[in-house]
Image (spheres, rainbow, N blue to C red):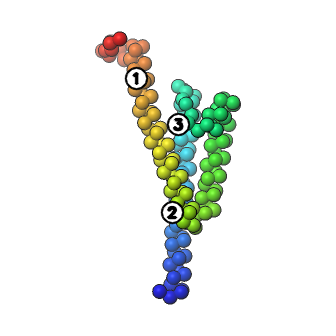
Amino acid sequence: MTDVGHLESRKRLGRDRSRRVVLLIVGIVVLSIGDLGITLLHLKSCGMMEANPVAAWIIAQTGSGTALTAYKALTVAICAGLLFRLRRHAEGEFGAWCALLIMAAVSFQWYQYSREIDIVVDVELARQGAYGDDWLILD
């Protein structure tokens, strides 16, 4: 391969990597918005335990969804900015894949939590007689 051909190939690979990283960043942001939305929903309805110690501290200290939103937005913006800056490098792409996988794992945890909390809510509603006389339960 000639030097010109090699240079063109490297440029194409760099553009492809850059596009992939930008798409991964979009995925990270979308999953992060979903995480924030579900977190706020649970905090405002039935409550929850926050696994992130910094977020838990912010919630405990401020009791504010706005403060939590600002913290999460800041952390996602920093992550996205760093990944965007490194988008042309293999390390940046690796970091973006890792961040996306972490957010996918968080989303799966929310799915599992939602299924379990639905069971708890159904049982409590059944105990309160919300499902009518046809719902049977033994104490």
> Given the image, on which type of amino acid does mark 3 rest?
Ile
Q: Mark 1 sits on what residue?
A: 122
Give above or below for 5 relative to 14: below
x then y, percent, for residue 102: 51, 48
Cα distance in 3D space between marks 2 and 3: 27 Å
At horizontal 55% and vertical 57% (from top left) the residue drawn is 95
**Dot 3 lies on which element?**
helix
The answer to the question of whether label 1 and label 2 lie on touching residues, with beta carbons closer than 8 A, is no
- Name the amino acid type tagged 2: Arg
Residue 46 in picture, x, y percent from top left = 53, 25
**Residue name at image x 58 percent, y 38 percent:** 52
Label of residue 38 in the image = 3
Q: Which label number is shown at residue 20?
A: 2
Q: Under tag 1, what secondary structure?
A: helix
Whether residue 98 is situated above or below residue 34 in the rendered picture: below
Q: Does residue 62 appear left or right of residue 4 in this picture?
A: right
Q: Nearer the viewer, residue 75 or 126?
A: 75
Task: Residue 68: give its label.
Answer: none
Image x and y of residue 5, in percent: 50, 84
Q: CA distance from mark 1 to mark 2?
A: 42 Å
Front residue of 53/101: it is 53
The residues tagged by marks 3 and 1 sit, at their Cα atoms, a distance apart of 19 Å
